[in-house]
Amino acid sequence: MGFRGKNKRKRIRKEQEKDSKSKPKPRQNTERKGNWFNNNSSTPTQNKRFDAYYSHQGIFDHSHATATASPSPTPSNETKTANKKIFLDTMATALNASFRISQSIPQSLRDQTAAQIAQFTSAPVTVNIETPNYNSSTKQTTISLTKKTIQPAKKIPFLKSAYQLDVDRKTIRKSSTLNAFHEWLKVVTEGGIITRQETVSMIPPAVLRVEPHHSVLDMCAAPGSKTTQLLEMVAAKDYSVSDGGGTKNGYVVANDCDFKRASMLVHQCKRIASPALMVTCHAGQWFPVLPHAQNDGKGNEGMFDRVLCDVPCSGDGTLRKCPQVWSKWTASQGMNLHSLQLEIALRGARVCKVGGYMCYSTCSLNPIENEAVVSSIMKQTNGSLEIVEVTEEHMPGLKRRPGMKRWKVLDDRKAVSEYFEKEKEKEKESTEEPKPVDTPVENTDPWSLAALEAKSAATGLFEFASVEDVPSLLKTTVRPTVFPPTPEEADAMHLERCIRCYPQDMDTGGFFVTLFKKVGTIGSATKALRKMKNEARRAAENEDEDNSAVVKEEDCDDADESDDDDEPMSKKQKQQVKKDDPNNLPAPSFSLVNQKPSVAAAAGKGAFKPNQHIINLPDEFWPPLVEYYGLTDECPLHQIKARNDTLKAMMFFTKEVCEEVVNKDVMGKLNLVHCGTKIIEKSNNKNVVQQYRLSHEGIHLVAPYLTKRKFVVGKMDFSIMLNFIGILNPKAFSEKLQEELKTVDQGSVYCALEGVGAENNMILNFWMSADTSLNSMVAQVEIDSMRERMRSGGWLCEVEEGIKKLVDDYAEEKRVIQNYMRAEKKEKEEKEKEEKEEEKEKEEKEEKMIENSLISSN
C-alpha cells in the first residue's frame, strides 16, 4: 500500500475530493459488493483451486470434531467425500450472528439483559430467508426466498453470557418480524451492554485465561472485538476495591500497525471507558521491547503476562461472512504472509513474561499460516515455549479438530509456475527421441495420492516435497520454515494440541488457535530468522548465470514480494526506505494500509505525532480544582496526567499503567494513540470561575471523590434529563432540585440517580448556565443506553406532556437566541475582516505612492 504522504496518486485523489466538496454528491449505491447483503451479487461460492488445495492437504481426513487433541482414525473415501461436501456446503451459507454480554457491566444488568434476550429469542420464529444460488454456467447468483423457522438462541458453552443465533445479520436487519429485536440490538450494542462478535473470534481471549491482575498485549488489535473482551476480563469494575476509582490492577496494551484502524479501535473500546487501556501504533514484528523487559540473564524476560497474536492472514475461514474471498483466494496468499506471521509471533513470545501465555490465532485453515508457523516458532525458540493442551474442563463444549503434523507445500505464484514450465521445456529439449507414451491406467480412486496431485496440478498448484527440492533462485520465495517437521519433531512439539475449528462443527467460521506457555528466555529469535533469509538470498545470488537466467527480473520482483528484508514493499517503497534500518520499514499485512505512524499522519487532519509523551501536571494546577470540585484527599491525583503541554484534557491512568509502562518508557519508544480515560477537559467559555469541566467519559472514575457541584436526583428528574438532548429548562425539575441548582455558579455539574449503586454508572454530566439551565454533555448513544438500563431496572418514569412542552419551548427559545448571537458574531467578524482588508489596501497604496515618488525623484 505504501507511504500515503508521498504517494502522488493519493495526493491527487485527495485534492480532487477536496475540490468536489462544494459540488452536489451523486446518490451512491448502498449495496455492498461481493457480499450476502447484495441481492444482485454474482459472487461464486466455489473455487476449484481452493477445493484441490484443501483436498490435497487432507483436512477432510478427520471424520468428526472432538473435545480433545486426539486425532480420529482415517476414514474411508466415502466418509472423506461426505466430510468435504458438508464443509463446502456450510462454507457456502451465510454466517449466523453471535454476541456476548459485556462483563464490565454490573451483574444485575447482565441478568436483566439475559432476560431480555430470552424474551426475544426463547420461542421459534418463522421468517423469510434470502438464499443465494450461484449458477456456474451463467456466472450469476439468483436470490430465492424460503421460509425458515429460527430456533431459540443457543448459549456458547465455553464463554459466560455469550449467545449464537440461528439467523444471519442480514436477515435480522431486513426481516420485519425481527425488527424489534434488531432495534434493541442496536441500542444495547452502542451502549456497550453487548458486543457483536463472531463465535470463533471469542476463543483466543478465552483460552488465555486472563485475570484482573494481568498485563496483556494484543499485538494486532483492530478492529477491537477481542480487545474489548480482554479489557472486560482485566478491567471489570469492582467498587468494593477502591483503587483509583474502582479499577483493578491489570491493563491492556492494544497495538495495530495502521493509525486509522488504531483510532477505530479507540472508538470501539470507549464503550468500556476503562483507564486500563493503552493503544499504540507499531508494526507488530517491531513492537518495542522496553529496557526493563530485556533478558536480564537471571531467567527473567518480557513485560506481559498474556500476549495475543491474532495475526493478519488470508482469511479463508471467513468465507461465510466475506464470500468475495471465494474468487480471490490463492495459495500464494498464505505463502506471502507466512514470514510476517512468524515474525509477529516471535516478537510476541519475546515480550511475554517467563511463565506467561501467548495465543497465536488466524481466521485461516491453511497449514502454511498455522502449523507451519507454530512449528517454526518452536524451532526458533529452542524449547523456551511449550504448546499447551486446551482441555474440556477449560473450554467446555468447544468442538475442535487436532492440529496437522504433516502438510503439503503447494504454491501457485508466478515465479514458481514459470520455473516449473521452463524446467519442462528444458527436459523436452534435452530428450533426443520422444519416449513411448504409456497407455494411462484409469484411476477410480479420487482420494489417491496420484489423483490429488493431478487435481492440484490442473488448477495451477505446484508442490515442493522438501527443502532440498527448492532451487536456489526460489529459496527467497519458498521459505524453509513452510515445510513440515519430521514425524519425531512433530510428536515432540505436540502439534496435535493446536486447535482447528471447522465451520460445520459448531456452525461457525473457520479458525485456528494455539496456546503457548513461555518456560524460558528467548532473546531476539528474529535475528536467527533474518540470518536464515539472508543466507537464502546469498545462495540465490551465487547461483551460476545459466540457472539465474531462468527467471526474469520482473518475475523475481513478483515472487519476492514478501521477502525483502522482512516485509513486502513495492519498488517505490524500496527506494524510500533504508533497508539496513528495521525501524524504518513499513509494516506488512494482507488487507491493511501499513506504514509508520509518522508517515500515516501526513495524510490528513489531526495527524498522529509519534512518541507523544505523557506529562505530569504542575503542582499549581491542582489547588483551584480541588477547591472548586471538593476533591477528597483520597483522590489519586498522581494518576491524572496530560498528553501534551497545552493541558486541554486530563487523563486518568491506573497505577500499574503509570508504573509498568509510562514511567518505564524512558526512551519514548512507544507510539501512543490513546492512553487512559479523559476525566477533565478545558472549556472555551472564559466567563466562568473554573474553565475546566468534568468529562462524561471518565465521570464514573472521579465521582467517588467529588463533594461539590454534584446533585443526587430522583427518578422523575433523571428521566426528564434522559428524555431530552440539549438545553433543559430548570422549571421542568422538582422544586428541591431547582433550589439546589441556585446554590452553585455556572460551570460543570453532574447529577447521579438516587438509590442506585455506583456500579450502575447512572451519572449525567451537564454544563450549567447563569440562569441554572442545564446543557447535556452526554452523547446520544450513551443517553439511549442509560435509558435502556433505566427501563431494565424499573427506574424509568413517563414524562408528562406538559413538561415535554415546557422543555421544548424553552429549548426553541434558546436556539433562536443562540442563532441570533451567532449571526451577530459572524457579522461582526466579517466587518472586522473587511476593515482589516481596507486598512491593508490603504497601506499598500501609500507604500506604492512612496515608491513611485522615490523613483521619480531619482
Image (cartoon, helix red, strand yellow):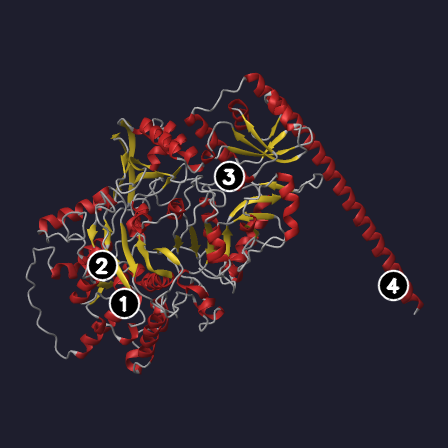
Ranked by sequence position, the earlier of labels 1 and 3 is 1
Q: Quadrant of residue 121?
A: top left
Which x, y percent locates residue 344? 36, 61
Q: Nearer the viewer, residue 500 or 206?
A: 206
**Residue identifier under label 3:** 700
**Residue identifier under label 2:** 459
**Residue identifier under label 1:** 481
Q: Are marks 1 and 4 in contact (CB under 8 Å)?
A: no
**Residue identifier under label 4:** 851
What kind of element bears circle 1? Answer: helix
Q: Nearer the viewer, residue 750 or 269?
A: 750
Which x, y percent locates residue 569? 42, 65
In screen coordinates, is 217 left or right of 678? left
Nearer the camera: disc 1 or disc 2: 1
Ranked by sequence position, the earlier of labels 1 and 4 is 1
Q: Quadrant of residue 695?
A: top right
Ranked by sequence position, the earlier of labels 3 and 4 is 3
What kind of element bears circle 4? Answer: helix
Distance in Å between CA atoms under marks 3 and 4: 67 Å
